[in-house]
Image (cartoon, rainbow, N blue to C red):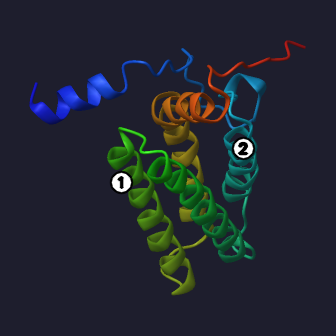
């Protein structure tokens, strides 16, 4: 362990992220809640838009990837801002992951705009996002949700889930 790792581990020792079981299904559920309402709300919207990616047609593929781009830029900018303004210790890795996803969004959008890709590529991208997001949320976003709850409320996230 190097000094940077020690600093990270020490700085985040009091962050308790909820333990969750990863779920890669395409339907939003209360099981995905992290306990920080502004983040939970944007994550639910993320699922709604990614579902449109997965179900797009050649006719609307460009519009849907543009809608997703608009959503994810705002989504990631908000989380990045929370991390920077509250000095969230592991922010660099989280921000880098956001940048990598944004780069992929731009590449898919450019390929669709230029006619080099069809709805199949957009649908595949959406499927990959559904595979990627649960791990991102379970590890990176849950720690940020716990951190933000501690910063804003002085405590740990409380999540109430419906079991219908």
Q: State the residue position of label 1.
A: 96
Q: Does residue 141 appear left or right of residue 8 in this picture?
A: right
Residue 161: x percent and y percent?
A: 80, 17
**Circle 2 — which element?**
helix
Which is nearer the eye, 43 or 154? 154
Q: Residue at x 56, y 27 (%)?
A: 146
How would you rate the neighbour count of disc 1 (Cα within 10 Å): few for under 14, some for 14-19, many for 20 or more? few
User: Outermost residue toward the front?
Assistant: 154
Res 104 → quadrant: bottom left
Q: CB under 8 Å between callouts 2 and 1? A: no
Residue 103: x percent and y percent?
A: 41, 66
* Mark drawn on residue 38: 2
User: Outermost residue toward the right?
Assistant: 164
Which is nearer the eye, 3 or 40? 3
**Circle 1 — which element?**
helix
Does residue 64 sit above or below 115 in this rendering?
Answer: above
How would you rate the neighbour count of disc 2 (Cα within 10 Å): few for under 14, some for 14-19, many for 20 or more? few
Residue 63: x percent and y percent?
A: 71, 75
Does residue 146 sit above or below 52 in this rendering?
Answer: above
Q: Does residue 129 appear left or right of residue 107 in this picture?
A: right
How far is disc 2 from disc 1 in space, using C-alphas? 21 Å
Res 8 → quadrant: top left
User: Outermost residue toward the bottom?
Assistant: 114
Q: Residue at x 72, y 62 (%)?
A: 56
Res 55 → quadrant: bottom right
Q: Quadrant of the N terminus?
A: top left
Residue 133: x percent and y percent?
A: 54, 40
Q: Residue at x 73, y 19 (%)?
A: 159
């Amino acid at each position: 362990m190097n000094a940077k790792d020690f600093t990270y581990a020490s700085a985040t020792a009091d962050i308790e992220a909820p333990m969750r079981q990863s779920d890669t299904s395409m339907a939003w559920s209360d099981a995905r809640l992290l306990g920080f309402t502004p983040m939970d709300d944007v994550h639910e919207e993320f699922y709604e838009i990614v579902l449109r990616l997965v179900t797009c047609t050649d006719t609307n593929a460009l519009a849907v990837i543009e809608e997703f781009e608009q959503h994810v830029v705002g989504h990631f900018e908000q989380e990045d801002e929370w991390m920077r303004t509250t000095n969230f210790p592991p922010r660099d890795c989280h921000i880098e992951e956001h940048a990598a996803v944004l780069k992929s969004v731009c590449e898919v959008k450019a390929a669709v705009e230029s006619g080099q890709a069809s709805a199949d590529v957009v649908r595949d991208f959406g499927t990959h996002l559904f595979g990627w997001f649960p791990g991102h949320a379970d590890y990176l976003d849950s720690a940020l949700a716990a951190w933000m709850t501690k910063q804003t409320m002085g405590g740990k996230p409380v999540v109430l889930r419906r079991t219908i």
